[in-house]
Amino acid sequence: MEDVKPVRSGWFNAFRPWSLHGAVVPVAIGGMVAYSDGALCWWIFAMVLACGCLLQSAANLLNTYGDFVRGIDTVENETRSPELVTGALRPRDVFLAGMLCLAATAAMGVVFMAYAGWEMILFGIAGIGGAAMYTVGVSYKYRGMGLIGVFALMGVVMPLGTYYVMAGSLSQEVLLLSLPNAFLITAVLSGNETRDYREDRASGVRTLSSRLTYEGSMRLYLALNALAYPALAALALAEGPWTICLALLALIDMRAVAVNSRLAPSSPGASRMLVPLCFRHNWHFGALLAIGYLLGAHFSAGAII
């Protein structure tokens, strides 16, 4: 596979806007069920989407900061996050930008509490705490809890919180619909940890993947990508609507992920593609899932009429 060029240092790369699938897809899942249930409020949905993107951006910025101050990002591996290593940005500025993203999220959280009740503070604590403490403070990434945190917070809590702020209740349907996508969001981080496996081991970083063998880390990465499909099939059979099977078209991306994974151990270019291919997989799967669900809701409403 063709090698990947080093990224350009700067704020654009520090924010990593291409990673926003981690927020957009979970919020869309909660929003589409709220729409189907007649509970969607467009301006609240837009605010939740903005908060999700701010949380993802904060996590990206603080991850760059945390890895730098711990000495994990160095001149030798600067193609990963070159902003602080090369001096393009100052550590203090990156840290403050991440905290400002969290502060903006907290400010909008006050609106959510006024709209839906004080219970929204629980979702806010989970979201802000998860983004802030990934590599700062508790630093659960370095304790082998990164994959678990992403699955729970971004994969499940975010869509549940999106639905709750508009409908005022939790939803079993949102919970079940969130699970296939939760595997794919977690797969992205697994790809990140697998790509950085050797550097993390050399630096003493104890991610979940670095606690395994490299082969074990790669198997986990592939399993997380693949598990979205049996979860989707089971959901379509048990709960429906059957139109969510439209997301099976993303198996084309799954094939690309699998082919690339076989090259990654010996090809630096293929290793760096572990994450971008997961980004694309998650975007396509999430979009097709949302379209399929809304089509099913439309057909169901037409049948009732």
Image (spheres, rainbow, N blue to C red):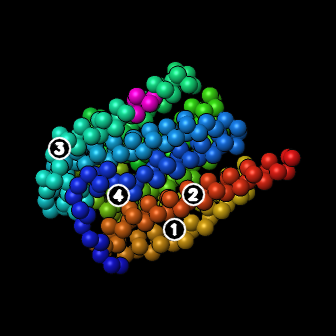
SS at circle 2: helix
Which SS type dominates the magenta stretch?
A: helix
Expressed as whole percent of the image width and height from the top left, the position of residue 285 reads: 56, 60
Mark found first going from the N terminus, 4 or 1: 4
Is residue 108 one of those drawn in magenta? yes
Residue on which disc 1 sits: 254
Q: What residue span does the magenta drawing correspond to? A: 105-109
Comparing 114 with 25, the one in front is: 114
Which image quadrant is residue 103 in? top left
Which image quadrant is residue 4 in? bottom left
Q: Amino acid at mark 1?
A: Met
Q: Residue furthest bottom?
A: 1
Q: Residue at x 49, y 37 (%)?
A: 47
The answer to whether residue 97 is left or right of residue 292 is: left
Q: Disc number at residue 65?
A: none
Mark found first going from the N terminus, 3 or 4: 3
Give the vertical position of 246 relative to 204 (above or below): below
Q: From where the camera sits, is residue 157 visible?
A: no
Comparing 88 with 224, the one in front is: 88
The answer to whether residue 18 is left or right of residue 289 is: left
| C-beta proximity under 8 Å, tags 2 and 4 | no
Q: Disc number at residue 192?
A: 4
Mark found first going from the N terminus, 3 or 2: 3
The span from disc 4 to disc 1 (Cα, nearest Å) is: 17 Å
SS at circle 4: helix
Q: Amino acid at mark 2?
A: Ala
SS at circle 1: helix
Q: From where the camera sits, is residue 205 visible?
A: yes
The span from disc 1 to disc 2 (Cα, nearest Å) is: 15 Å
